[in-house]
Amino acid sequence: MSIITTARRALLLGALAAPAVVHAQGAWPQRPVRVIIPWPPGGGADTVGRILFARVAEILGQNFIIENRPGATGTIGANAAVRSAADGYTLLYDATGLSINPFLMPHIPFDVRRDLVPVFLSAVVPNLLVVTPSVQVRTVQDVIALARNTPGGLNWAFSGNGSAQHMALELFRQMTQLPLTHVPYRGGGPALTDVIGGQINFFFSNASASTGHVQSGALRAVGHSGAGRLASLPDVPAVAETLPGFEAYEWNGAFVPRGTPAEVVQRLNAAMNEAIAHPAVAERLAGLNVGTRRNTPDEFRAFLEAELSKWERVIREGNIRLD
């Protein structure tokens, strides 16, 4: 699924020369590698990470042991990785929150730009702008018109203060200057349930979680937060077709602590590029509506920098704070 096609992302997701095939021989890894995922088991990052690192383990000939360290919106696990030895035997597999938390939690004990080395951007998923079918809107333009003509604005769900869906909603509000009522939920599942039931008007929902509901007719998708069209929902336009420049993704990727040898970074990047190209891995990720492309550490760093800059601006302009 191709979902990042804007000029800002062109370098990241352009056609890349295929990395050399990685074999098990070499100085690294000589023992099992710990992969810290700072989110609970069963979530998006955990699911994709387990699929991916199972294949990486086969490629490199060593076990990659997943260690879930949730808490403080991902900060506890990320800090544990930052403070680990920079020898390639502890990795961080993190998600969108890494580019949001520094501006909501100014006292986190590490600096994302300084203390972490991006290795591989492994999953990029847009959000779907979904509505219960009983609401008579079919396009983003319809949503904007309805919001402007509804006293007090529309009710919008989001899955937690500071979540990727919250940021997508706030970016939409800032770009449209619409009167919107934010309704926080404890997770995307309860929010989806209430949108399907008609208790809430709209929701930017992770495409992996909501595509099935759209295909079944339980929800209507009027737009998505990526660029171009989605292979799984080709008739759903990008919000950016109405609001140029609107992009809001959920993503996951692998990092190592600052000071990790460059040869380890390159070897791991090559193995992860090889892993996503494996037919079984590609099929499983496609089934989750996860977009993947080959990329280099420098390209992932450029993507991360763009995300950090965007969410810093959105959070500052929206005066968003954690309760």
Image (spheres, grey):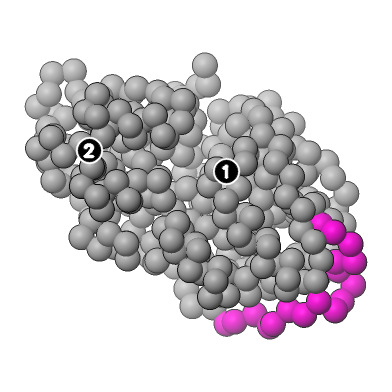
Q: Give above or below for 37 relative to 321.
A: below
Q: What residue is drawn where x is 51% and y is 37%?
A: 312
| Residue matched to label 1 | 42
Whether 29 is among the magenta residues is yes
Residue 213 placement, left or right of 315: left
Q: Which mark is residue 131?
A: 2
Q: Quadrant of residue 79?
A: top right
Residue 227 placement, left or right of 148: right
Image: magenta residue range: 17-33
Whether 220 is among the magenta residues is no
Residue 14 placement, left or right of 267: left
* Residue 261 image point, x, y percent: 84, 63
Q: Give above or below for 287 relative to 211.
A: below
Q: Quadrant of residue 137?
A: top left
Q: Amino acid at mark 1?
A: Gly
Residue 5 placement, left or right of 311: left
Q: What residue is drawn where x is 60% and y is 48%?
A: 46
Q: Are marks 2 and 1 in contact (CB under 8 Å)?
A: no
Q: Main secondary structure of the magenta part?
A: loop
Other residues around mark 1 within 10 Å, as few (<14) / some (14–19) / many (≥20): few
* Residue 17 image point, x, y percent: 57, 82
Q: Quadrant of the N terminus?
A: bottom left
What element does badge 1 sit on?
Answer: loop
